[in-house]
Every structure is written in C-alpha cells, then in structure tokens.
Amino acid sequence: MHLTVNSVGCSKTAISMADSCVLYKWPGQQNWVYLQGELVPVDPTRQGFVIAPFRGNAKMITCLLKEESTEFPQEKFSNMVKRAQDDYLFDPLHALDLYHAALGKAIAAVSNGKLKKVVVSRQEHFACRDDHFIRQFPALAGAYPNALVYFLSTAEHGSWFGASPEILVEENETSFTTMALAGTIKSELEIEMKDWKQKEIEEHKYVADYIAALFEKNALGYDRYPTAIHRTGNIHHLISKFILPKNQSTSLFELAGMLNPTPAVCGLPVEESRRFILEHEKYDRSLYTGYLGPIGMPKYNGFYVNLRCGQKIAGGAFLYAGGGINKGSVAGDEFNETCNKMENTWRFFN
C-alpha cells in the first residue's frame, strides 16, 4: 500500500487479493484489455500484468479473467474508479519544503562531483470529482496513442493510472526494444535538435551511454538508433532506441532486471543516486518510476517505466513527477519541469 512519509497516510482497502484488476491499452493499438485475478509473485510462465514499485518486489495480476474490446469498457472502468480510497491526509506546503530541500542537496551533490546526475521527484494533490474523472479518462488515451495507458486496482498498491511514453523493455517476435528517454522541453510547437540546450543534451547522453555500456558489459549485441525527439502532448524528450536480437542468451525479465532503474529515473552512478533518493526524498515513490506491463500474451508484451502517472483517490489524485539534476541545473527550472509534466497529464481532468 502506498504510504508517503511525513505527508500521506491511508487505511486498508476493502479490495481482496483475489480481486485485483487492470485496464490497459498497448501503445499504437485500438483494443482495451481488462484483466482480473490474484496478485501473486511474478511467474514468467503465466499470463498477467506485472507491477514493479521503485523499491520492493514485483508482483503480477494473474489472468483469471481477460476481456478485450475496441470500445472503452465504461462500466468496468467506473467500478474500478469507485474502489479508490478517500481517507488521505496531505500537507502540500510540507511536501514542497521536503522537495526543495532534496533539490538543493541534489544540486550540491552534482556540483561537488559526488554524482553526475540524480533525479529528484515530488507528489502533488489535485482535486477532481470521480464522475468527471471517469468521463475524461478516455481522452488521456486518445491524446497519447503511443503511450501505455492504464488504470489498475490492487489491495497492495491502491488505484493507479498513467500514460507512460518510456519503454523499459518491449518484446517483439525477433527482438527486444529499449530506449533512453531523457531531456525535457515544454512547447506547443514542434521543435528541432538545434533547440536543445547543452544541459538537456548531456542529460540524455548520460542515459544512452549507460545503456550501451551495460549491454557491452553483458556481451549483448545491439543496434543503437540516432537520437531523435519524442513528443507527448506539449512535452518533448530526446530519445535513443536500442534493438537487441533475440538470438542471445537473455530474456524479457533478465533485461528488465538489468535496466531497472535506469539513469533516466534514478541518476548516475545508479546505485549512489538510488541511495541519495531513498535518503533525501522523504516520501515513498511507490509505483512511480517503477515499471509495469503485460506478459504471456499472444503479442504485445513488455514493460514501460511508470511515468506521467498518479494514484487515484476518491475526489482527486496524487500526481508524481521529477527531473534530472546535473551540472547547469537551476532549482526554479527543475520545479517548473515537474509542474509541466503533471499539467501534461492532469489537463484532461481539469
């Protein structure tokens, strides 16, 4: 269950472990898939939907019931939303103080060379009537057709939703795909490579070079595609894709374990950045910057990093966003970046 140290608390939900469910739409597809089953430890031989927090063990909703439709299943979704809890306590000013304190320490750690990069995140509460959220949710999927869009409900994690653009590892018929997605610009207009500042270019290069070095260390062959621009709403990222042929001694889960957490959501060096986050963020990211996705399906299997996401509660939601701190980072700019990322998700529910 999601707990936020010093800011958010919640009580137990009435959802049983055998009544976990998820509704999702795979990127580029029209069909919605609804799964319902038990929440169990991951079993790569079974069909289901994997849920991995930023810290903690991955679990999966087993495929006891599966339904697929090109139409949005409004009634099922409404019932899922109604499970969301309503007894949260949140102090927004205290949460902001904690974020700015962590941000200042991150900028100092990067400036003195202790870290190359570290991602500092925060949460914010947004109010919204449940009936409005239910009506507007399909617009999120319509606006981001190339994202993994989902809503899930479990006793352990509560109710979460999101539209993630970032592949952790995707399984295709003959290959695996992953990506470096880092560096951010907000713009309603299309932008070009010349529009990026050195800070964003370096932030992206750290992530892409790390992934390449990781594959080389593990003797895995890969193709690295040229850096391009990926747009999600009015948020633009730099993106580099990597393709790995399947004729190598690795698997979907091995690659996920190798890549998670990436420098895009953690920092560099990865382990030192992870320790910094756990010590200084002062709240539990829970599913934010973990990963999730379906396994064992006839096609469209793999995991997306859980970005542009939120935890649904009765009458609103907690949204999560972060930014990569490296040399050249300015505290005010980093805070604005988190606002832009949250707004890019919540604008559908205003």
Image: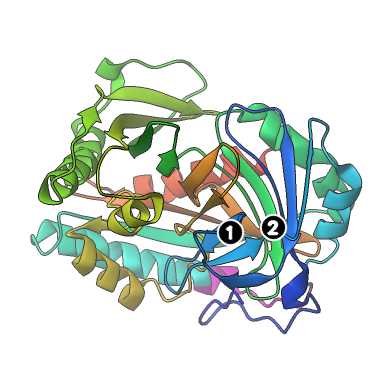
Image vertical order of residue 15 relative to residue 42, above or below:
below
Q: Which residue is mark 1?
A: 46
When asked about the image quadrant of residue 170, the answer is top left
Left or right, 139 with reference to 78: left
Q: Position of residue 141 (x, y in %)?
A: 68, 34
When asked about the image quadrant of residue 111, the answer is bottom left
What is the magenta range? 86-94
SS class, disc 2: loop
What residue appears at the point 42 percent right and 66 percent down from the top-left corner? 99
How many other residues sit within 10 Å of disc 1, few (<14), some (14-19) or many (≥20)? some
What residue appears at the point 29 percent right and 33 percent down from the top-left corner? 245
Type of residue at label 2? Cys
Q: Position of residue 337 (x, y in %)?
A: 43, 44
Q: Position of residue 261 (x, y in %)?
A: 33, 58
Q: Mark 1 or mark 2: which comes first in sequence?
A: 1
When asked about the image quadrant of residue 98, the answer is bottom left
Type of residue at label 1? Arg
Task: Please say whether residue 122 is one of the residues in the magenta stretch.
Answer: no
SS class, disc 1: loop
Q: Which residue is mark 2?
A: 63
Looking at the rendering, in which quadrant would you find the C terminus? top right
**Residue sitting farthest toward the left:** 113
